[in-house]
């Protein structure tokens, strides 16, 4: 090889090394504030994105819950606290997160509930409507929408009544059954539909359906979408099911 060829090869190698050095690092999943209380709450409102590997300064009495693709962590003041990474908290496994946010609200039609030690039962999937909670409900697939109830010891019937025209449909649960599909034939799943759910020995609740234009596929994307639409019942489930260590 001539000296010219060797020089060209060396220059090419140096160019590639330089490009690798200045190339941007692949972006990490977003770290999102999902809950905030205390003196610094206004500085860290729900929905605020935090810088990767950054720190936040908290005061005594502060409590900030942050979430990324790997899980959720509660940071408490005062002093500086690492905001990311959240991974390694041990609260949420990869499989557990996948099951929680999978685009399939009807995935469990028998029990369909989880119960930790000293905790109330809750849906196993964020896309199941909690029939005890009022407010906006985010829908990712109008064909798989499902209803969830916490009490399963006895059979029960829920009545869904659509606001506006008063059209109603009944959904019967067998004893031991927590999840039933939405009554698609009687009530169409449409954006903005407001339905009152009554029965099962609980106070009536009112749910407004919000159809998401894009299906979120990661934990942080799901939290971001729920925050944007005000779907607080689903966000609470997402946060509570994935919360790991508390950092002071």
Image: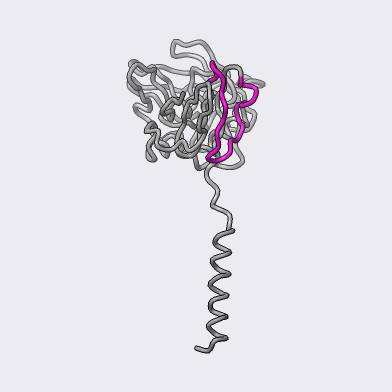
- The image quarter containing residue 162 is top right
Where residue 205 appears, as percent x and y from the top left, is 55, 16
In depth, the one of 73 and 187 nearer the eye is 73
Residue displayed at 36% across by 19% down: 152
Where residue 63 appears, as percent x and y from the top left, is 53, 21
Residue displayed at 42% across by 37% down: 97
Residue 59 part of the magenta-drawn span: yes
Q: How is the image coloured?
A: one colour
Residue 41, placed above or below residue 25: above
Q: Of all residues shown, which one is farthest toward the bottom? A: 2
Residue 189 seen from this side: yes
In depth, the one of 214 and 64 nearer the eye is 64
Instruction: Report the magenta residues as a range.
Output: 40-63
In depth, the one of 165 and 173 nearer the eye is 173
Residue 76 part of the magenta-drawn span: no
Where residue 232 appears, as percent x and y from the top left, is 56, 24
Residue 80 is left or right of residue 114, and the answer is: right
Residue 139 seen from this side: no
Where residue 105 appears, as percent x and y from the top left, is 46, 34
Q: Of all residues shown, which one is farthest toward the right? A: 164
């Amino acid at each position: 090889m001539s000296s010219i060829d060797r020089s060209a090869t060396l220059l090419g190698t140096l160019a590639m090394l330089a490009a690798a050095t200045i190339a941007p690092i692949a972006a990490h999943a977003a770290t999102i504030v999902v809950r905030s209380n205390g003196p610094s709450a206004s500085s860290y409102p729900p929905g605020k994105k935090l810088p990767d590997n950054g720190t936040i300064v908290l005061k005594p009495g502060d409590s900030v819950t942050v979430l990324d693709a790997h899980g959720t962590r509660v940071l408490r003041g005062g002093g500086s606290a690492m905001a990311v990474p959240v991974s390694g908290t041990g609260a949420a496994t990869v499989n557990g997160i996948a099951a929680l946010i999978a685009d399939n609200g009807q995935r469990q039609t028998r029990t369909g509930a989880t119960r930790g030690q000293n905790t109330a039962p809750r849906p196993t999937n964020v896309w199941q409507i909690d029939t005890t909670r009022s407010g906006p409900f985010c829908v990712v697939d109008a064909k798989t929408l499902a209803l969830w109830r916490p009490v399963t010891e006895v059979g029960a019937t829920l009545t869904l009544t659509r606001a506006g025209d008063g059209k109603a449909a009944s959904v019967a649960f067998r004893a031991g059954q927590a999840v039933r599909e939405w009554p698609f034939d009687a009530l169409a799943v449409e954006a903005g539909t407001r339905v009152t759910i009554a029965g099962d020995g609980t106070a009536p609740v009112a749910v407004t359906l919000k159809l998401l234009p894009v299906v979120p596929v990661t934990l942080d994307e799901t939290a971001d979408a729920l925050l944007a639409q005000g779907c607080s019942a689903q966000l609470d489930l997402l946060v509570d099911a994935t919360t790991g260590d508390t950092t002071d």
